[in-house]
């Protein structure tokens, strides 16, 4: 009989599993790569059929994304020759750049609202999760279920009440209103995830700190938080993804001052209709902050998957 290990996979199994992972990764990356490629196409190449894989790249989509353009007469164009490379691009359509577009403002709104609500969700969620994990709270299970139940509710079910309430409170189309709303939605997820992580931290660590003269807050700040850093980073990624991509409330409650990028990008209009290269360029730029944030915290995210293996 040939001996074999129950826990150690064979070389053939490793190759098969690796091939499946690589194939799955390539398939899931196709839409992302196609969006990035469309951002460097001309409007004609973006809507050509059959779709063009090989094309002459251009920055026209990015120029249209960050600028507003207006059509001028031939006399005006002849009297004012283009001075920069991006002005030469719009001159091909007998147009001049009138000024910057609103994409920069909308992108900044997404950064403020997304990261602001994520920070507030993690801050409040960590405190609440620590309380549920370490103290005897009456009806703790009922309260936790109630917190989780707010996550189950579809946004459209509360859209009209929230719209009326925000209009009365003056929170419509404000950064504060959107941050509070996204925090209210994300805090249930933050509490449940972080409670699981804090439950895995041995209570003896805090007891030893308290014996050494630490206060409860010092033990929480210097002992629990460093141990829960993995869970906090993982939870922050999920909270940011929701706040960053949220569309329904952003369309309903914002229109100008606090409008984020998701409802703005689909409204980019070009010469003959929807400017698909500019839309793709905006989507590509919109992906970068979350992608960078996730890459920076990827070690914590991977550790968070196996955090339950900690031995008390």
Image (cartoon, rainbow, N blue to C red):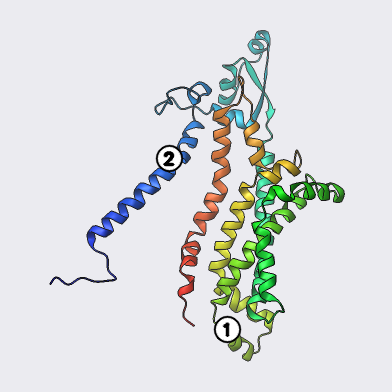
- Quadrant position of residue 262: top right
Looking at the rendered structure, the secondary structure element under dot 1 is helix
Residue 198: % across, % down? 58, 74
Lower position in the chain sequence, tag 2 or tag 1: 2
In this rendering, is residue 129 above or below 60? Answer: below
Residue 242 shows in this picture: yes
Residue 122: % across, % down? 65, 64
- Nearer to me, 49 or 256: 49
Q: Is residue 158 left or right of residue 308?
A: right
- Nearer to me, 253 or 114: 253
Q: Residue at x 65, y 29 (%)?
A: 67
Residue 250: % across, % down? 70, 44
Residue occupied by mark 2 = 30
Category of crowding for the residue at label 1, using alpha-carbon neighbours closer than 10 angstroms: few (below 14), some (14–19), many (at least 20):
some
- Nearer to me, 151 or 176: 151
Q: Is residue 218 left or right of residue 286?
A: right
In this rendering, is residue 132 above or below 243? Answer: below
Q: Is residue 216 left or right of residue 37?
A: right
- C-alpha separation, residue under disc 2 versus residue under disc 1: 46 Å
Residue occupied by mark 1 = 203
Q: Residue at x 66, y 39 (%)?
A: 263
Looking at the rendered structure, the secondary structure element under dot 2 is helix
Q: Residue at x 68, y 57 (%)?
A: 185
Which residue is outermost to the left? 1
Q: Residue at x 59, y 21 (%)?
A: 90
Q: Residue 136 bears which disc, if any? A: none
Residue 127 shows in this picture: no
Q: Is residue 103 left or right of residue 38?
A: right
In this rendering, is residue 70 above or below 124? Answer: above
Residue 66: % across, % down? 63, 32
């Amino acid at each position: 009989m040939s001996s074999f290990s129950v826990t150690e996979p064979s070389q053939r199994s490793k190759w098969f599993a690796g091939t499946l992972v690589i194939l799955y990764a390539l398939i899931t990356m196709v839409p992302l790569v196609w969006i990035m490629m469309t951002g460097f196409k001309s409007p004609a190449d973006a809507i050509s059929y059959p779709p063009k894989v090989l094309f002459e790249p251009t920055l026209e989509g990015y120029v249209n994304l960050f600028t507003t353009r207006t059509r001028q007469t031939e006399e005006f164009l002849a009297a004012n020759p283009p001075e920069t490379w991006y002005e030469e691009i719009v001159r091909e359509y007998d147009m001049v750049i009138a000024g910057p577009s609103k994409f920069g403002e909308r992108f900044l709104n997404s950064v403020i609202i997304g990261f602001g609500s994520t920070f507030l969700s993690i801050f409040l969620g960590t405190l609440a999760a620590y309380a549920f994990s370490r103290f005897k709270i009456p009806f703790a299970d009922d309260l936790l279920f109630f917190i989780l139940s707010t996550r189950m509710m579809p946004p459209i079910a509360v859209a009209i009440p929230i719209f009326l309430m925000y209009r009365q409170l003056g929170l419509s189309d404000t950064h504060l209103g959107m941050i509070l709303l996204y925090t209210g939605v994300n805090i249930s997820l933050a509490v449940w995830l972080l409670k699981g992580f804090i439950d895995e931290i041995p209570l003896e660590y805090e007891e030893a700190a308290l014996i050494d003269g630490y206060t409860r807050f010092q033990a929480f700040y210097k002992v629990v938080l460093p141990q829960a850093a993995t869970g906090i980073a993982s939870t922050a990624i999920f909270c940011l993804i929701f706040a960053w991509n949220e569309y329904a409330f952003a369309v309903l409650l914002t229109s100008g001052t606090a409008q984020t990028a998701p409802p703005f990008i689909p409204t980019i209009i070009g010469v003959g209709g929807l400017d698909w290269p500019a839309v793709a360029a905006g989507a590509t730029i919109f992906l970068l902050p979350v992608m960078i944030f996730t890459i920076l915290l990827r070690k914590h995210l991977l550790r968070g998957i196996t955090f339950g293996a900690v031995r008390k």
